Amino acid sequence: MTLQISRRMMLAGLFSSAALPAARPALADGPLDSLRPRHRPEGLMERIENGGYPTINMLLERNKISGHSAFALASLEDGHILEGHEAHQPLPPASVAKTLTTLYALDTLGPDYRFTTRLLGTGPLEGGKLMGDLILAGGGDPDFDTDNLGDLAGGLKAAGVTEVTGNFYYYGHSLPEARLIDIEQPPHVAYNPGISGLNLNYNRVHFEWKKVAGKWALTMDARAGKYRPDVAIASMTLADRAGPVFTYADRNDRDEWSVAESALGSRDGARWLPVRRPAAYTAEVFQTLARSYGIVLDTPKEMRDLPADAFQLASYQSRPLHAVIKAMLYYSTNLTAEIIGLTASVARGVAPGSLRDSAQAMSQWAQQQYGLKEVSMVDHSGLEDDSRISTADLVKMLASRQAQDSLRPLLKDINLRKGGKVIDANRPMSVHAKTGTLNFVSGLAGYVVGPDGTDMAFAILSGDVEIRKTLPMEQRERPPGGRTWLARARNLQQDLIERWGGVYGTG
């Protein structure tokens, strides 16, 4: 529907929050350093009036999003700031943070960097016997799965090893270890796993329930395409209770889960659960896979430091970093973001003791690299809502030559939608961006090309931190009002992009 508005209404709404330097401290309080002060494109007001485009205030009023909503838009052709609202207001970026992490990792490690997982030996190899210890040493690979681990076991056999006389060790300390990313998430969500230098299946375990002879049979396994070995380091018991659905206990060096029988329903089912001890989990699964090749290993033991005389028996290399990141941005994998961020910090000599230490180093890098002012990250994935960045900073970063060259080609193609339907199958505008979603937090940042080819960088963040603070743990997976709030935030994003394409992209 076309909105009929007067020139006076349009001018008042447009310039109240987005166009006059004296209006308010958003983008209106000056240029973004390397970007130029905003200007009024030729014929702007005529396009606004003839197209009937709503003002920024109208869009904000229409969508009625609680908390703060901020955005910034810049022309990539001439570096001018086109529009902004509360753009210097730091907000949680959610997974939009992965754009910053991407640039940090690519700048530090390079697009062709590969993660390496190794099998090391101590002592000589005599007649198929390794006369010493075997060490499974992680290099941080976030995509490493059970099939890859099976290939590594096959590599050990190909190296001529049929027996190990010493101990079997695992090493995950190439990166700082953590039991989880964000302590404020529900314990059972698979997107909040443990972190280690030795990871498997995105540090998730597959929980399955089936009715067998009228009773529930529960299994926990490390399945991938070719293999599905059962695991003991993560276990599940059935509980006769109304709620909660899951409980978790860190007990006896194991992940001990229970599930409410009433929550299983009447049908067989399955879901992934997070693994809190990824290095030990990987070692247990390798022990099983090695046995399938006839190599019997002792119970895995943790190793804190690699021996200097260890030699390589077999190895597995990941895909190049640019391919790992492209998948991370598409699927928004939190584990991958944390791993590549930590790996970059270690490569820079930071020696982080925690995710927060590493994220702080990344924030300092961004301040130096791009001149950002309102960035303070506490992780690399955006899962924690204590992270902050402004849309002004995001647009400044996106407008950089480095971001346009290395980040932009990796971003996902975003469809514009209205009422659940894609707008205009002929695609008069193209949008490549990163989404971000937490409860009562939503973001979208990237690049939009208008119908006339005008190339722009944008960032939109909405967040109601006060509501998030009041949510009890049992409501944090599906909070009351969360879906409605998110729908409004996403609708604002679509409205803004549609407006920008018409107002600034049809010159």
Image (cartoon, rainbow, N blue to C red):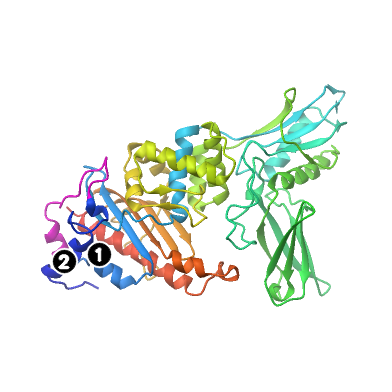
Circle 2 SS class: helix
Residue 414: within the magenta?
A: no
Of 386 and 261, the residue lying toward us: 386
Residue 174 appears in the rendering: yes
Q: Is residue 215 above or below residue 115?
A: below
The numbered mark, 1 or 2, whose residue comes first in the sequence reads 2
Mark 2: few/some/many CA within 10 Å (<14, 14-19, 20+)? some
Task: Please give the name of the residue rendered at 19% of the width and 66% of the height, measured from the top-left corner.
Answer: 13
Q: CA distance from mark 1 to mark 2?
A: 10 Å
Residue 324 appears in the rendering: no
The amino acid type of the residue labelled 1 equals Ile
Circle 1 SS class: helix
Residue 42: within the magenta?
A: yes
Residue topped by disc 2: 12
Task: Please give the name of the residue rendered at 23% of the width and 61% of the height, measured from the top-left corner.
Answer: 17
The main secondary structure of the magenta stretch is: loop
Of 450 and 369, the residue lying toward us: 369
**Residue 378: x percent and y percent?**
50, 49
What range of the chain is rendered magenta?
30-51
Which image quarter is the N terminus in? bottom left
**Residue 97: x percent and y percent?**
45, 50
Task: Please give the name of the residue rendered at 68% of the width and 70% of the height, measured from the top-left corner.
Answer: 245
The amino acid type of the residue labelled 2 equals Ala
Name the disc covering residue 75, or none: none
**Residue 59: x percent and y percent?**
28, 68
